[in-house]
Amino acid sequence: MEAKVSPSIARAKAELLAGGAVRIPQDFRLPFLPSRSTAGPGAGSTAAVFSFGETRAKKSISRDEGDFELSLDENGMSILRNGEVLIAGVKIVPTVYHAPHQAFINIDSSCVMDCKFCATPRLNDGITKNLTDQKIMSMIEDASKKDDFLSVSFTSGVPSTPAMTVKRMAGLVSATRTLLPRTSIGVEPYATRPDEIEMLRSAGADEIKLNIESFDRDIFDKVCPNRDFDIIMHMIIHASEVFGKNRVSSNIIYGLGETDENVLEGVSVLANTGAVATLRALRRNQYNISELERILGALVPVTADRMLHLAEEEKKILQSHGLTTLEFKTMCHLCLSCDIVPFWDV
């Protein structure tokens, strides 16, 4: 199956994702408010989503410095690297909440899991949003009135116990399903019991994301000290039975010292359960890199070549299992902005 974008655009996107911030002109006024995410790879940064060649990339932005530069002229916007055009025909697109076309809500930024790559619980109170359920539902109702709105997604830290977090998420899913009966809803919980998966499905969730994070067990134990690898795998298997084909996904983060073979073994294991891996390059930032390198040693930054190679190999594995990223209607495979997405970008 041909990708939605050209190889040259996929290469440019990978180069952009592998690099640092985009510097924007001091006098340039963004057409939309920037995104200030409290979850995901861009947590803690001020970012914008750049659209080009039928794909998107979400990048941190700065008025002062960056690996890339946004250039404006009579022909529109381009992204430059070292003074040369990397991507022409760029547009800045709005995020509904956190992502284009989605109200992707982080229910709670506090978390006891202490995953070493995650910036979310390390953000200060000025960045986190301390949302009540009432406020979240008001945000979703407002988002649903926007022309570019397509779906609702929920993620969350674990402020006390996984069970309490899932229960709160299920309540919000149920309220959203009542408010928006025909809207796709995705959930990204840390679930530890089969009945929690069933609770979310019964509440009205259409898709679920259960993150295994790393298939290297030694790395997993070091970077996810309060999570259980085997429980997560059992939840993924059960979720595939409950939600069905092309409705279950799982992050595999690479750039933590694992091999490509290990990453692709993880893709295959997930595919055997009916789940689709979301391959995500580690985002090195002020919140995670010192602790990660303390426990893992020096880490090699992920290159564009590695991003493209792993995505191309994942596509082959998914095809052999009759799986695709293109059927997802919520969360990361719809967003496109943080990863090289098989079937879309390659």
Image (tube, grey):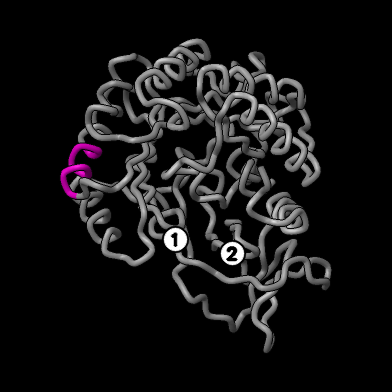
Residue at 60% over, 56% down: 57
User: Does 173 appear in magenta?
Assistant: yes
Left or right of 165 in this view: 256: right
Residue 50 on image: x %, y %: 59, 64
Residue identifier under label 1? 95
User: How many labels, in total?
Assistant: 2
Residue 159 on image: x %, y %: 34, 30
Q: How many residues crowd around disc 2 within 10 Å: few (fewer than 14), some, or many (20 or more)? A: many
Give the dominant element type of the magenta stretch: helix, strand or loop. Answer: helix
Q: What kind of element bears circle 1?
A: loop
Q: Nearer the viewer, residue 166 or 174?
A: 174
Q: Amino acid at mark 1?
A: Thr
Residue 211 on image: x %, y %: 50, 27
Residue 157 position (above or below residue 285)? above
Q: What kind of element bears circle 2?
A: strand
Residue identifier under label 2? 50
Left or right of 7 in this view: 209: left
Left or right of 163 in this view: 81: right
Task: Indicate the quadrant where residue 222 lies.
Answer: top right
**Quadrant that contains the N terminus:** top right
Q: Nearer the viewer, residue 63 or 177?
A: 177
Task: Indicate the quadrant where residue 89 lies.
Answer: bottom right
